[in-house]
Image (spheres, coloured by chain):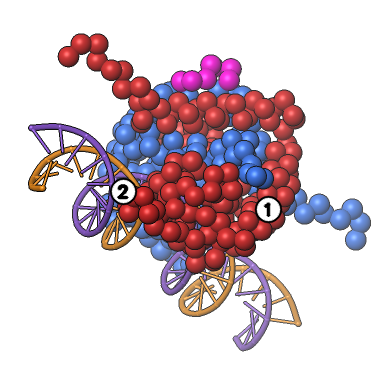
Chain colours: A red, B blue, C purple, D orange
Amino acid sequence: MAAVDLTTHPGHLARRLQQAHYLLWNTMVSEEITSPQFAVLNALVAEPGLDQRTVGERVGLDRSTIAEVISRLGRRGLLHKVRDPQDGRRFLLRLTDDGQRTHRKLTVRTARMNQVFLAPLSAEEQTVFFDLIRRVADAAEDLRNPAEPLVAHQG
Amino acid sequence: MAAVDLTTHPGHLARRLQQAHYLLWNTMVSEEITSPQFAVLNALVAEPGLDQRTVGERVGLDRSTIAEVISRLGRRGLLHKVRDPQDGRRFLLRLTDDGQRTHRKLTVRTARMNQVFLAPLSAEEQTVFFDLIRRVADAAEDLRNPAEPLVAHQG
DNA sequence: CAGAAATACTCAGTGTGCTGATTAATTGCA
DNA sequence: TGCAATTAATCAGCACACTGAGTATTTCTG
């Protein structure tokens, strides 16, 4: 009697959107490398030698998840991790040649997939689509990490 | 050198959006019942006595995932599954009184959470937000399930 | 009615994603 | 210097999400 219409629930839509993307990625980009794995490769192309935690921050993965993703990429020989001689807690990450090649190959395919994925929207709609999602996601993230702790005015 | 800007990748945005939602759900709705679990409860409020596969179809979960979600809800005493006397392959699902109560309670909280989540957007923007995401997700789903096999015009 | 095809569900395996607890290393302060 | 706090990473535990393979039941067809 009191059932709700889930098509107006942003969480439900977000999940469906991600699932749809997952399937398309699998058929058009790669069955081996996942989208989060590609994000990690991409982060290390942009900034080689990052440590694990920072990579996670860049791509939006928590400490546990980033550890597993990196371990898989390591097993596949796409990156290597070395202890930071300056700070023994850190591992510094770099892509191997194979990792570089894989990133280049997937970059092309990902661009094609994005075109297909966004094809139902006009160019202007695509811009709005990005803008709206980004604003909602950013605001929700800020709710958890209150950016400026608003330094107390006086002790 | 050839790194890509992930903020223009719909898959990456979809993932961030879902993560943001997950966190907000946890703090504002429930730490026990997840959003997919609520979707299942909701489907069974709308249509009591559905079988497992159909519930999965309604909420967008595959056969394996829906099985686990239902088993968890069963363990919590929120629903029960009975073999369909008409078709021994099926399990028919119904909410318990506790399940009904839980659904009612979470419906209220979910509405509040949605308001907070969507607060960064104006009312018109929220409409556009739903429309764009729905269109992209629907189109991608159709790519995998070619809706109408386009019945041949003549034998 | 019997065998084949379809269907509902289960199971094993993999991967993403979170929290809380633990370990190891560094930093900061008295 | 020496101990406390912080920080990077790991580990265990839970939950979602998919595929491919297997089982049981029903349906379809000859």
- Whether residue A39 can be seen here: no
* Tag of residue B88: none
Q: Residue at left 43%, top 23%?
A: B115
Picture coordinates of residue B108, whole percent (x, y) = 35, 28
Q: Which residues are magenta?
A: B119-125
Is B12 situated left or right of B36 in this image? right
Picture coordinates of residue A3, whole percent (x, y) = 44, 35
Residue beneath disc 2: B78
Residue A27's image quarter? bottom right
Image height of A60 relative to A101, above or below? above
Picture coordinates of residue D7, whole percent (x, y) = 31, 42
Mark 1 vs mark 2: tell me if same chain.
no
Q: Label 1 neighbourhood size at 10 Å, few (<14), some (14-19), many (20+)?
A: some
Q: Residue at left 36%, top 30%?
A: A145
Task: Tell me the kind of residue under disc 2.
Answer: Leu
Q: Label 2 neighbourhood size at 10 Å, few (<14), some (14-19), many (20+)?
A: many
Is D22 situated left or right of D5 in this image? right
Is B71 situated left or right of A70 in this image? left
Q: Residue at left 52%, top 55%?
A: A94
- Compare residues A100 and A141 and report the one nearer the observer: A100
Task: Tell me the kind of residue under disc 1.
Answer: Arg
- Compare residues B28 and A135 and report the one nearer the observer: A135
* Tag of residue A104: 1
Q: SS for tag 1? A: helix
Circle nearer the viewer, 1 or 2? 1
Is B121 situated left or right of B132 in this image? left
Q: Looking at the image, how many numbered discs can be counted on the residues? A: 2
Quadrant where the C terminus of chain B is found in the figure: bottom right
- Residue at the outermost top position: A154
Q: Chain of mark 1?
A: A
